[in-house]
Image (cartoon, rainbow, N blue to C red):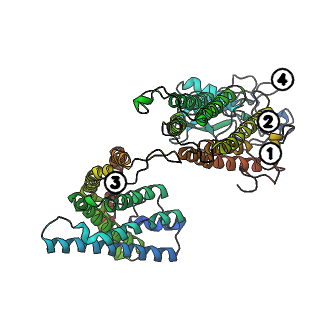
Amino acid sequence: MSAPAMGTSKTAHTDSSHKKKKGPGTLAIAYLVIYNVVMTAGWLVIAVGLVRAYLARGSYHGLYYSIEKPLKFFQTGALLEILHCAVGIVPSSVVLTGFQVMSRVFLTWAVTHSVREVQSEDSVLLFVVAWTVTEIIRYSFYTFSLLNHLPYLIKWASFLNIHRYTFFIVLYPMGVAGELLTIYAALPYVQKTGLYSITLPNKYNFSFDYHSFLILVMVSYIPLFPQLYFHMMRQRKKVLGHMEEYSKVE
Amino acid sequence: MNKRVTTQTWEGTKLKTQRRWTNKTDNMDTLALEATQPKKAQNGALVLLPGPPIPAKRKPAKKTKKAVVFFEVEILDAKTKDKLCFLDKVEPNATIGEIKSMFHKSHPQWYPARQSIRLDPKGKSLKDEDVLQHLPVGTTATFYFRDLGAQISWVTVFLTEYAGPLLIYLMFYFRVPFIYVPKYDFTTSKHWVVHLACMCHSFHYVKRLLETLFVHRFSHGTMPLRNIFKNCTYYWGFAAWMAYYINHPLYTPPTYGEQQIRLALTVFLFCQIGNFSIHIALRNLRPPGSKTRKIPYPTKNPFTWIFLLVSCPNYTYELGSWLGFTLMTQCLPVAAFTLVGFIQMTVWAKGKHRSYLKEFRDYPTLRSPILPFIL
């Protein structure tokens, strides 16, 4: 889903205490900085690609094709974040991060890539834009957080953090809408072609109906979306509360 | 911990000295010692406390009566540290179980099974059998309470979670309406392996139900209520998923036909007997009503000889049974169920193995948790 990764929001001034706990070493920090810089750059490339394509064509239609490759590359690259949690250099839950990343990867490959007919849908643009803005803010924030020993960068980190938690109020529903509409658009084609489906009889006595599975996925948004949304709202209140104190201390 | 009082206990002689600071001195059996009059001490007890003498009434020492020092017990909420309950005149040999009953009287919504009583708010739960005077507490014992939530008995959970698969599978076997295409309602499969599978599956769960009622001796009475929903979803869900395919009109029998089925049945039966043997052996380790723990050893029954190599052979045999069933039905959902069960049982076996090692110094070193030499 288009929500920024949940883990711990590494607000700048609490980061040093986090480091003392499990402490990723300097090598890990250097690697993470590079990772986050690369990801920021990647999503910027996607953003620029979208703008340029829009200006060139003069319409919103079919912009997916202009950024298809970097989108696939950088969204899939996010799988590394699961590894980061598993190894312990990022203090987030493996399960939570895994779930978030897998849902993005699922939408990128198992829906948008696999069902060619939906690629020209406007709903695709909806979630791509939501993801792009979210990820640029998220990755640049993490970069600045990691480099937080540079005092003036803390301001930037806070700036980004505020915007991250504020923008998501619009971006998140936007992304979810785009995702749901895209899956919905894919349904008839999946049913017609029997994509990724296994029917009986077969020697392993197993069947799988991808069409029904997609419907199940759509239904699962109902309990999950509000939970994630309100979690982010709560985080936001916390973070904005801290920001106020911080600016007062100054 | 109450800092006013020092307690000393010597094992064996069980000498104890406490000084009670109390206004409730109507109790005949209070032993009061003053630092100024050590000769007053009974039972050869030592005077330990500094501090001002007690203003309490001093009864003339009754030599014939054994001095019983009653405890005071206060129970605080582990999270909020609120005082929930104060019990006075608690017998020193009272068990935690009895204290829980007393606590239950003042807070009827917290029946003993859902109380977790600990010495430290973040510490381990004390056992029901623990005796008050043997705990590292002063005469005013402070315990912390945590609500474990609504509890349900293990027996209830087991019966429910096993009855489900038994009945659900049979519903699919008899092709009850609304599962398959209507023309197949109430028909039976033409493959004899499907009938065999139904018998094996049903036998397995009947065995489990009977074992729950007559064989197993549970160390815990209850588990959290939410477990029944979790467990039933798992068992019932998987049973339905497996049964759907095995009893499907389009079911495909095993590739290697009769040979495969015969081998699978042998493995299945062997492991069922094995599993049962282990359950009986474990039961015999523990006298009725007790919660003792002993190292299990091989008995005359050859099926228990696996104890030489494995700590939890009941799980080993269970895995074997389901591998047999997978082979018999050649059904992917059955394989999935076997795999998930194996992962869970391995986790349990490793835990049990670790606690055996911790509890028994002389635990056989050749044993692995669940798979000989491997896992």
Gap between marks 1 and 2 measured at Cα = 10 Å
- Marks 1 and 4: in contact by CB < 8 Å? no
Q: Position of residue B362 (x, y in %)?
A: 84, 50
**Which chain letter goes with mark 3?**
A
* Mark 3 crowdedness (10 Å alpha carbons): few <14, some 14-19, many ≥20: many
Is B159 located above or below residue B329 in the figure? above
Please identify the quarter of the rendering in which residue A71 is found.
bottom left
Residue B22 seen in the figure: no
The answer to whether dots 4 and 2 both sit on one chain is yes
Question: SS class of the residue under badge 4?
Answer: loop
Quadrant position of the C terminus of chain B in the picture: bottom right
- Marks 2 and 1: in contact by CB < 8 Å? yes
Dot 3 amino acid type: Met
* Residue position for label 2: B281
* Tag nearer the camera, 3 or 2: 2
Q: Position of residue B368 (x, y in %)?
A: 75, 52
**Which chain letter goes with mark 1?**
B
* Disc ID at residue B307: 1
Is B274 located above or below residue B29 in the figure? below
* Residue position for label 3: A232
* Tag nearer the camera, 4 or 2: 2
Left or right: residue B226 compared with residue B369: left
Gap between marks 1 and 3 measured at Cα = 52 Å
* Tag nearer the camera, 4 or 3: 3
Q: Position of residue B200 (x, y in %)?
A: 64, 34
Please identify the quarter of the rendering in which residue B16 is found.
top right
Left or right: residue B371 compared with residue A26: right
Please identify the quarter of the rendering in which residue B121 is found.
top right
Question: SS class of the residue under badge 3?
Answer: helix
Is B347 located above or below residue B265 in the figure? below
